[in-house]
Image (cartoon, rainbow, N blue to C red):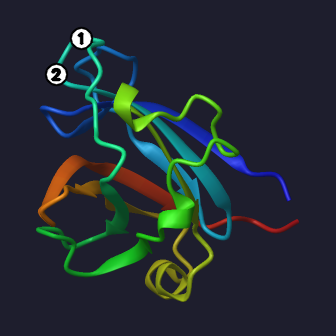
Amino acid sequence: MNINIKEFGIDFDRSKTQVIDGSLQSANIVLYRGTEYVLRANVYSNSASTVVQAFANTVGWELDIGRLYGSNASPVIIEANTASWNNTSDWTLTDVTEGRICCRVNTSGDLVSSDLGNASSDTYTMEIWYTNNVGAKALVVSDACSIHNATII
């Protein structure tokens, strides 16, 4: 199976995805139900710059996609498995100390299938969190994400 790759920038101080690195314009991540992705992101420490946001190698990571947020009350996709995060087999450039993170995520779950139903697509919020060495969760990005139903031909 081919893995689909989505590359984007993250503006850490605004917690938004970026169309172009260093841009203030936000991007909408588009995913298709029933597909496996590798999300690759360059994380920048402030708006309109390409100064990287460094993270410690010891932090934990989580990706949530859902409708209700504020610590993601009802996600349809959760990826908190350590094995899915920051693997050089998914992105040879991944390096959290240099602001380059990646996550392997599958949109085939029962929750997303049930929530999306027969709709052609729906808009959700994608959030990426990290957990520091004292167990506190910090938001890296919170932005729009569209999930479309895949058409089988």
Which residue bears the numbered disc 1? 49
Q: In the displayed structure, does residue 80 sit left or right of residue 59?
A: right
Say which residue appears at 16% left-offset and 21% top-offset.
46
The answer to whether 96 is drawn above or below residue 153 in the figure is above
Q: Residues within 10 Å of mark 1 (few under 14, many from 20)?
A: few
Residue 106 in percent (x, y) is at 60, 67
Which residue bears the numbered disc 2? 46
**Callout 2, which amino acid?**
Asn
The quarter of the image holding the C terminus is bottom right
The quarter of the image holding the N terminus is bottom right
Calculate the distance from the C-alpha at mark 2 to the C-alpha at mark 1.
6 Å
Q: In the displayed structure, does residue 42 sit left or right of residue 33?
A: left
- SS for tag 1? loop
**Callout 1, which amino acid?**
Ser
Residue 64 in percent (x, y) is at 35, 66
Do the numbered discs 2 and 1 sit on residues whose CB atoms are within 8 Å?
yes
- SS for tag 2? loop
Residue 68 in percent (x, y) is at 20, 73
Residue 74 in percent (x, y) is at 26, 81
